[in-house]
Image (cartoon, helix red, strand yellow):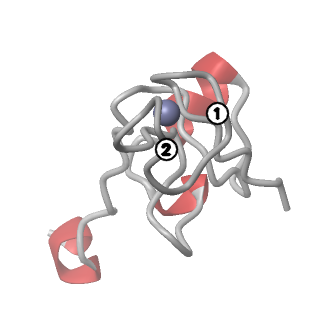
Amino acid sequence: MTTRTGRCVECGRTHTGPTAECASPKTMNLPAGKTCAECRFTRHCQAMYGKTAQDETCDFFPVRFLGKPAASEAAA
Ligand SMILES: [Zn+2]
């Protein structure tokens, strides 16, 4: 399990709420509770960027997390 850095890509600081310098934190964290494995781009990111299925951050900004299609959709 990786640790969420929470580092803001806007100001480079770690903050989860608004600060005097930065109104809204922009991090590369995936949505709460989601991991790389749950994203439909996971294979691409693991192959190209060395991400792991347990990663809770995205190498893209803005975060490109996109849930996998529903089972019924995948089976079609
Ligand atoms: Zn910031």
x 49%, y 63%: residue: 38
The residue wearing badge 1 is 46
* Relative to 75, 64 lies left or right: right
Badge 1 marks a residue whose secondary structure is helix
x 45%, y 23%: residue: 10
Q: Position of residue 32 (x, y in %)?
A: 51, 71
Q: Position of residue 45 (x, y in %)?
A: 55, 30
Whether the residue carrying mark 1 lies under 8 Å from ligand 1 is answered with no
Q: Position of residue 23 (x, y in %)?
A: 35, 41
Numbered label attached to residue 3 = none
* Relative to 49, 25 lies left or right: left
Classed neighbour count for the residue bearing mark 2: other residues with Cα under 10 Å, few (<14), some (14–19), many (≥20): few
Instruction: Quadrant for residue 70, please give it.
Output: bottom left
* Relative to 3, 21 lies left or right: left
Residue nearest the viewer, comparing 23 with 55: 23
Whether residues under marks 1 and 2 lie with C-beta atoms below 8 angstroms apart, the answer is no
Q: Earlier in the sequence, mark 1 or mark 2?
A: 2
In the picture, the quarter occupied by the N terminus is: bottom right
The residue wearing badge 2 is 19
Q: Position of residue 26 (x, y in %)?
A: 42, 38
Amino acid carrying label 1: it is Gln
For the view shown, which residue lies furthest in the top direction?
48
Whether the residue carrying mark 2 lies under 8 Å from ligand 1 is answered with yes
Amino acid carrying label 2: it is Thr
Task: Note whether 9 is above or below 20 in the view shown.
Answer: above
Classed neighbour count for the residue bearing mark 1: other residues with Cα under 10 Å, few (<14), some (14–19), many (≥20): some
- Label 1 – label 2 distance at C-alpha: 34 Å
Residue nearest the viewer, comparing 7 with 4: 7
x 28%, y 79%: residue: 71
Task: Note whether 70 is above or below 55 in the view shown.
Answer: below
* Relative to 75, 56 lies left or right: right
